[in-house]
Amino acid sequence: MLTKTLFKAQEYEGTKMIARELPMLLTVKQAEDLTGLERKYLAKLADTGKLKVYRTMGNQRRYYKTSILNYFNHGKQ
């Protein structure tokens, strides 16, 4: 079951957003706001293969929203 924080309305760039309104690929800031986790911990999860990420040409991370939701749905291992 998802934690309540994933669907809690977040203030993001002046607009109320919840998980279903976010794009498929999330910036680090969007992923932080959605999960409540720090960027270092998100990076650690990505580096260990627990979260799927896309790397931009500038080598920035974009987190797959489905990967984040699956991680919370199916338990943290």
Image (cartoon, helix red, strand yellow):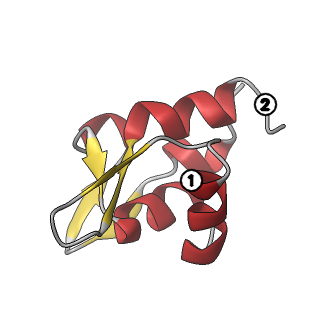
Q: Residue at x 56, y 53 (%)?
A: 46
The image's mark for residue 46 is 1
The answer to whether residue 66 is seen in the rendering is: yes
Residue closest to the eye, 52 or 23: 52
* Residue 29 in the figure: left or right of residue 7: left
On the image, numbered disc 2 is attached to which residue?
75
* Residue 36 in the figure: left or right of residue 57: right
Measured from the top left, where is residue 16 in percent x and y?
28, 59
Q: How many marks?
A: 2
Q: Determine whether label 1 and label 2 are within 8 Å by CB.
A: no
Measured from the top left, where is residue 13 in percent x and y?
21, 74
Corner quadrant of residue 75: top right
Q: Residue at x 52, y 40 (%)?
A: 68
Name the residue type under label 2: Gly
Q: Residue at x 68, y 51 (%)?
A: 48
Residue closest to the eye, 54 or 17: 54
Q: Which of pointers 1 and 2 lies earlier in the amino acid sequence?
A: 1
Name the residue type under label 1: Ala
Most distant residue in the left direction: 57
Q: Secondary structure at mark 2?
A: loop
The image's mark for residue 13 is none
Corner quadrant of residue 57: bottom left
Q: Residues within 10 Å of mark 2 (few under 14, many from 20)?
A: few
Q: Residues within 10 Å of mark 1 (few under 14, many from 20)?
A: some
Quarter of the image with the C terminus in it: top right
Q: Secondary structure at mark 1?
A: helix
Measured from the top left, where is residue 39 in percent x and y?
54, 74
Quarter of the image with the N terminus in it: top right
Task: State whether residue 8 is above or below residue 29.
Answer: above
